[in-house]
Image: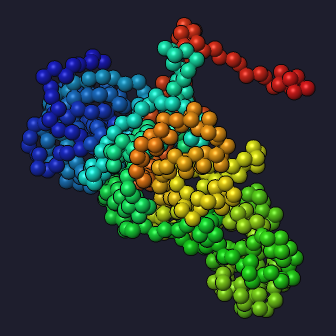
Amino acid sequence: MKLDLMGDLHRTHTCGELTKEDVGNEVVLMGWVRRRRNLGGLLFVDLFDRHGLTQVVFRPDDDPEIFARAEHLGAEYVIGARGEVMARPEGTVNTDLPTGEVEVHVAELRVLNASETPPFVMEEPLKASDELRLEYRFLDLRRPHMQRLIEARHKAALATRKYLAGNGFLEIETPILAKKTPEGARDFIVPSRVHRGKVYALPQSPQLYKQILMVSGCDRYFQIARCLRDEDLRADRQPEHTQIDMEMSFVTEDDVFGVAEGLMTAIWREAAGVTIETPFPRLTYREAMDRFGSDKPDTRFGMEIVDLTDLLGETEFNVFRSTIEGGGTVKCLNAVGCGGWSRGEIDRREALAKKWGAKGLAWTKPVDGALQGGIGKFFSEKETAAVRERAGAAAGDLLLFVADARKKTNEILGRLRIALRDDLDLVPEGRLNFLWVTDFPMFAWNEDSGSWEAEHHMFTMPRPECIDLLETDPGQVLGRLYDLVLNGVEIASGSIRIHRRDIQERVMAVVGITSEDAERRFGFLLKAFDYGAPPHGGLAPGLDRIVMLVTGEDSIRDTIVFPKSYRGISLMDGSPSEAEPAVLDELGIRFVEPPDEESRDRDSG
């Protein structure tokens, strides 16, 4: 087919804006052919762009040559069409389309570009593998669903800028080529050609730079920041992600929470047309773990974890009694309405609990005033009444028990709670439950290395009452840390930061960083603290996850325009790719193949 140039043909309207008010006007539309239907005497084309779809009509009586060319239009051809807007005949109006009352009768057709047959049909729901979608991402993004996601992300970013700028924040860029510092994940590194043998690191976050900005007197900073981490991927993790990075001077947690809640309100209003209620509820980390078994609890449904430890210390059920005597806990979930489950259904949940580390999953069912089946026979009348009252158990319910150390019990029942949520469809449609989780432990003990590690990062200020525990009992130190959680997904993390050199050095010492190492790795930050660093704190909401939740997606991958696969590969452009030997030589890089299994066996022998 002969291809045309635009020439003097200029688009007057998008494919999503024509209405009955335009009937009788001559217009020029440009876009992609989504569908073509030949009904003999008439040929209909659905013409599409990111704004919508308009039906254009070709009639042989108007111009046989144009009609003949239109018969050869293929899917995804790019065309320009000039013609008159007409009201659709009675009975053919499409009420599902904003443009469904009109059509354009074409008087001039220009084929601006042809298209190969697409590898998948551009219809919803899309029937194509993730790999095929990523390989042909330029087509995948052309779909209306993906265009809506792109627009939602734009609206969220725009709302962020408008809200933060309106609240005294300055948008400031921080370096992409940065000093390599440990921040919890593996860095991507960039070799320096000029300084052979030395490297830059791509930023995992702007953490140190935003603290430096507070020392510099910037007071309120934000940045829609690209962050890069060389870590294993999953549905909600990519090597590149975007966070709304913000930092404020002279603030407390309440100040940060107020700004963040206002920002979330602005984003949901602008990107989704939804009003959310503030202030958000708050839970301490300990409360969240004890009640929900997770530091990012989904509070849209009940089924909270019930602690029975104080009620069952003398029970005849030896597993529970010995666990309590050993310092452990006994807790349960009340699976409301599940008393009719078969033994097979209960065994399936027990297999899950064992997979997560439980020794078993005990059970019993309230019937009349008693507990029947499973371990119910071991409870005294007094224990039965106390357990039923505390668990809120009624006839027809099912009680599921785990006995172990507190942390392990909470985590197992927390995971079981989420599994039951999904099995029983417990979440009301459209509910948004925001929640602050506060007062996280500062440090976690690494059994493998036999040392303390920062639970979040080492730049968090300990709670005032915990500072004296840094050297004597790090495991009891709570940080001024906080996470923002929505519907069981962590969407932001932040803290009140350390702003004094002496406290920063003490925290670094807990995780094994000597004063010499501290000076070598973080000397510029410590030096800044010597020159009047103000108290400061901040937060970093994840833009990808926010857009995922705003749009109801299941993964952050589709909220990122050009994501990587689960193996960290861009299937569209083929990155990462090999570098030419001359480039590697110039940078002083030599790749060494890892030993194969056989050679590793020989080495270990």
Q: Is residue 20 left or right of residue 281?
A: left
Q: Residue at x 8, y 40 (%)?
A: 25
- Foreground: 96 or 245? 245
Q: Position of residue 371 (x, y in %)?
A: 76, 85
| Residue 562 to residue 418: above or below | above
Asked where in the image residue 12 lies, by quadrant, the reply is top left
Q: Quadrant of the N terminus?
A: top left
Q: Residue at x 66, y 81 (%)?
A: 391
Q: Quadrant of the C terminus?
A: top right
Asked where in the image residue 604 lies, by quadrant, the reply is top right
Q: Position of residue 459 (x, y in %)?
A: 53, 48
Q: Is residue 195 left or right of residue 151?
A: right
Q: Position of residue 46 (x, y in %)?
A: 29, 39
Q: Position of residue 398 (x, y in %)?
A: 70, 77
Q: Residue at x 16, y 49 (%)?
A: 19
Residue at the limit of the structure toward the top, as seen here: 582
Q: Residue at x 75, y 83 (%)?
A: 311
> From this viewpoint, is residue 205 visible?
no
> From this viewpoint, is residue 80 visible?
yes
